[in-house]
Amino acid sequence: MRASKQLACLLTIGILLAANMASADTISLNFAPNGGVIGTTTSAGVVSVANWNDSATNDISNPSGTDLMDSSGASTTLDYAAAGFDTNYNTNAGNTTGDLILQKDYLDNTGGTATVALSQIPYTAYDIYVYFGSDGGGRTGTIGDGATTYYFKTQGNGNFAYNQTTDTAGTYPTTNYAIFANLSGVSQTLAVTKGSNNSGLFGIQVVEVPEPTTLSLTALGLLGLVRRRRKRA
């Protein structure tokens, strides 16, 4: 009987924590200058969600937008503005899945550094996922948020599996996204810098990091109770 009660407590803890994690919101932005639109019903991204915000599809190299919607379809305060991208281009990713569409069009940086400024971020704590690449493989570059800079080498046409760079030492792994974790503040500026050849940005996700809730604290309390009972036994 005691084991059954402990198991029930552990199951309750798991359910409460899972519910808390599921409450996290995500704001997703797809750069679609050549018409590669994900839309609201298709899921895409490492954090796979629907309700993507597609940038203007009329060949704009430096788009901007206001009050982007989150993964539930609700409007938020998040605004963005791209600057320094001198052209745009596309890969041969195709349109069969959301993840391929995400890696189809990109804002192209053919020289120097280009940026995307995010403002009025509605979350207290969050992670930012940045997707980058090019139609050509083996092109080096960096992506940074002002505090951390990650190095990458583009995957190029034909390789659209998600691979994360965590390199801050300049080894240039072949990858197509980076995560800037545990951020705070209402604004961030992401900068992509050209290395050996031009590359650019496919899209961005801002993922809320949930704060501890009353349910989570209750779950932790239950866990402590289970541990104390085990010690007495």
Image (spheres, helix red, strand yellow):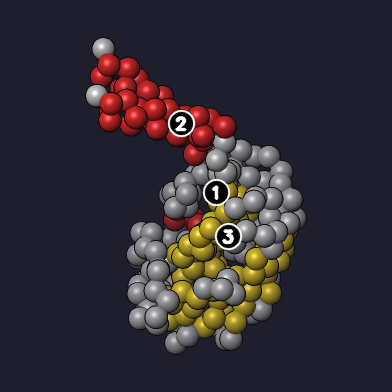
* N-term-proximal mark, 1 vs 3: 3
**Contact between labelled residues 3 and 1, with CB atoms less than 8 Å apart:** no
- Density class for disc 1 (Cα within 10 Å; few <14, some 14-19, many ≥20) is many
Badge 1 amino acid = Val
User: What residue sits 68% from the left and 67% below the top?
Assistant: 117
Of pointers 2 and 1, the one earlier in the residue sequence: 1
Name the residue nearer the viewer: 186 or 218. 218
Point out which mark residue 183 bears: 3
Report x, y in % for residue 9.
37, 23
Provide residue 213's location: percent of width, then percent of height.
57, 36
Residue 111: percent from left, percent from top: 57, 86
The picture places residue 125, in percent across and down from the top left corner, at: 60, 53
Relative side of 138 to 123, left or right: left
Q: Which residue is mark 1?
A: 209
Disc 2/disc 3 C-alpha distance (Å) = 28 Å
Q: Which marked residue is nearer to the observer: mark 2 or mark 1? A: 2
